[in-house]
Image (cartoon, rainbow, N blue to C red):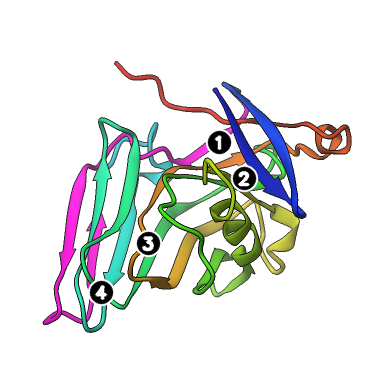
Amino acid sequence: MCKRFWVAGLAFSAVWTADANALVIDDFSVGATEIEVDGNVQGVTRVQLGLDTAGVLGGAREITVSAPGGDATFVVDANAQQAFFPLGTKTSVDVTLSYPFEPPADLRGSGGVLALEVSGISSPISTGIYFMRMATGARGGVVTFDEQLLALSSTEPRSGVIEIPLTDFTGVDFSEVTEVAVVMRDLPGSLTIAFDGIFVTPEPSSLLAAGVASITLLRRRRA
């Protein structure tokens, strides 16, 4: 499967192939659910436990959705292996996907990049706050991905991979990671977007230097 994505303002073709060394944080193949938030509810948090660890690292997923003054719907479609949001009418939406690990996860040797695969962005994004969080207990790091997401949304097909080097998460002991989270705040009310997977992948810098990014993502095989 080939897609186009943007890095530092330049477009590259990305060839995705299966890689047994990539680590799945969430491929959205398990834990189908739908969360609806209306104008009378400030926010909803759904905690999913006991999920198949082949699809969700650690088996736990926490989803928080809020839409002050409006409504929104967040859907995990296990058949399509995607999470879709938001859908409805609202002024802005906040979404957090959190993955608590108990016992802590050892990410050493899994790769050098935390990757978020996105698709189906309905329109260019110019506002909002977007970041990933990784923690070891009370210590952790937060890294924004505003520029990468805004760049992806501005060019067809409005899909691709957002990458953050693990070394950017300062203060994290990668042998004992207790949480990984994706946080999106103040999403425009008219926006729809899909997550196709969250992974730890091999470092692609050598291929980027050649002008072609090859990102290998492990997707859980459907039965």
Residue 49 in view (yes/no) = no
Chain-order first, disc 1 or disc 4 = 1
Disc 4 residue type?
Answer: Lys
Task: Classify residue 205 as left or right of residue 189.
Answer: right
Going by the numbered disc 3, the residue's amino acid type is: Leu
Classify mark 3: helix, strand or loop. loop
Across and down, in percent, residue 39 comes to 15, 79
Residue farthest to the left?
Answer: 40
- At 58% from the left and 61% from the top, the residue drawn is 150
Q: Of label 2 and label 1, which has the lower sequence position?
A: 1
Would you name the residue on which mark 1 appears? 23
State how far apart marks 1 and 4 are (Cα): 35 Å
Instruction: Write down the region rendered in magenta.
Output: 21-48
How busy is the neighbourhood of tag 4: few (under 14 within 10 Å), some, or many (20 plus)? many
Asked whether the residues under the numbered discs 3 and 2 touch, taking CB atoms below 8 Å apart as contact, a structural biologist would say no
Q: Are marks 4 and 3 in contact (CB under 8 Å)?
A: no
Choose mark 2 or mark 1, whichever is in front: 1
Q: Are marks 2 and 1 in contact (CB under 8 Å)?
A: yes
User: Which type of secondary structure does the marked residue at label 1 adopt?
Assistant: strand
User: Callout 2 environment at 10 Å: few (<14), some (14 to 19), or many (20+)?
Assistant: some
> Which amino acid, mark 2?
Leu
State the image quarter where residue 213 is shown: top right
Rendered view: 197 above or below 67: above
Mark 3 — residue?
A: 191
